[in-house]
Amino acid sequence: MIEVKDIHKNFGRKKVLKGVSFTVNKGEITCLIGINGVGKTTILNAIMDLTPIKRGEILIDEKQHSPEMYNQITFIPDAAIMLPGMTIQQAMDFMKEYHSVWNEKRAKDLLRFFKLKVSDKIQDLSKGNVAKVNLLMGLSLDVDYILMDEPFSGIDIFTREQITEVFSSRLVEDRGVLITTHEISDIEHLIDKVLLLDDGVIMKEFYAEAMRENEGKSVVDVLREVYEG
Amino acid sequence: MNLILNKRDPIYLQVMHFLKKEIVAGHLKPGEEILSRRQLANDLKINPNTVQRAYSEMEAEQLIYTEPNKPSKVTEDPNVLRQLKSEWVNQAVKEFVSAIQTVDITIDEVTDLIKTEMNHHKNGG
C-alpha cells in the first residue's frame, strides 16, 4: 500500500498541496482526477521522491523513501522518457541493464501487443506510439506499484483503446496502479477508486462501483456535483 | 460481445444481467464454458475486480459453477434454470404491465397483441 499522509507543497508563495491524504492499494486502479494545474503531477513526483514536500509523509509498504523503493514502484510520465536518438531496442537494452526487475518476456509481449518496431527511433514516433513505448518500459518492470501521468492525454482513439485493454489485462494484475487524468469518461468502467483533487486537497474519495450501486451516479455525475455544486 | 454498458448502474449487475439473458435465451447452454474473468474484462474493457464480483454473485446464485483450475460453466441443474427463466419472464411482464397500466386497453386486447407479436417473432420477424 502507498500511503500519502497530509502532504503540503508550495511553489513560491502559491500553496499547491494543502494537506493531501489517500492510499493506493494493490490489486486496484486508483484514479486521481482534477483539472489541469491543480497538482496531480506534483503528487506523483512526491511519491517518487522527485520533489521535496513541505510537510507530511509518504510510506510505501509502511516504509519511508529509500533507494530500494525503485525496485517496487515505477513512474510512467506523459512525455518521452528515453533519449530521442535511441531506437526502441536500445531503450529496452538500457532498461534491462539499469533495472534488476526488468522482465524481458513481458517487454516482448507488450512489443507484440502494441505492434511496435524495435528499430524505430523514439524521436520519429507519433505521440500515441511514444505513450506505448513509455507504457512498455514501465509495465515491463516487475514492480508492485505503477504510477502513470495522464496516460490517455492527446492520443488517438485506437491507442486509447489499446491502453485501456492493458489496464484490464494480466499486465497490471495484482499491482497497485495510480493514474492521473483530467478526462474520465473513457475509463469510468475501468477504475476502482476515484480521488477528486481540487484546491490543494482531496475533495472527494469514493469507489466507482459503490457509487453506482448506492447512489445510482456515474463518476462524471459526481464530478459535476463537486465542480458545479 | 453484444453488451453496451451504461454509466449509472453497477457494472457487475449489468454483466450478470447480460449473462442471465444469454442463458435464458439458450445462447449459453447448460454445462457450457463461459468466458474467463480476464477475457470478459478485456473484451468489455472493464475492471477485472468487477467481473470477479459478477461471477462470484452468479456462483452464489448457483447459475454458474467453477471446479478448481477450470473455466466456469453454466449450471446443469434444471431447477435453477427453471427458476431463472421464470424470474426473467416475471420481471419482463412486470415491466410491461407497468408501462401500459395507464393506457386504456382491455386484457383481451393486450393478450391478442402479445399473441400476434409472439407469432411474428416465431416466424422470424
Image (tube, coloured by chain):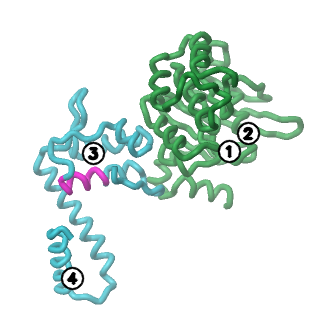
> Magenta stretch containing residue A177, yes or no?
no
Q: Chain of mark 4?
A: B
Task: Tell me the CA gap for discs 2 and 3.
Answer: 42 Å
Q: Nearer the viewer, mark 4 or mark 1?
A: 4
Marks 1/2 same chain: yes
Seen at 30% across and 44% down, the residue is: B57
Q: Nearer the viewer, mark 2 or mark 3?
A: 2
How far apart are labels 2 and 4 at the CA level?
61 Å
Say which of B41 and A214 sits in front.
B41
Q: Which lettered chain is shown in green? A: A
Q: Chain of mark 3?
A: B
Give the numbered dot on residue A197. 1
Q: Which residues are magenta?
A: B18-26
Q: CA distance from mark 4 to mark 1?
A: 54 Å
**Percent position (x, y) of residue B112?**
16, 82
Label 1 residue SS: strand
Relative to A189, A138 lies left or right: right
Chain with cyan colouring? B
- Return the residue at label 2: A39
What amino acid type is highlighted by mark number 4?
A: Val
Residue named by callout 3: B58
Helix or strand or loop: what does disc 4 sit on? Answer: helix
Q: Residue at x 58, y 48 (%)?
A: A184
Q: Are marks 1 and 2 in contact (CB under 8 Å)?
A: yes
Q: Main secondary structure of the magenta part?
A: helix
Q: Which mark is residue B49?
A: none
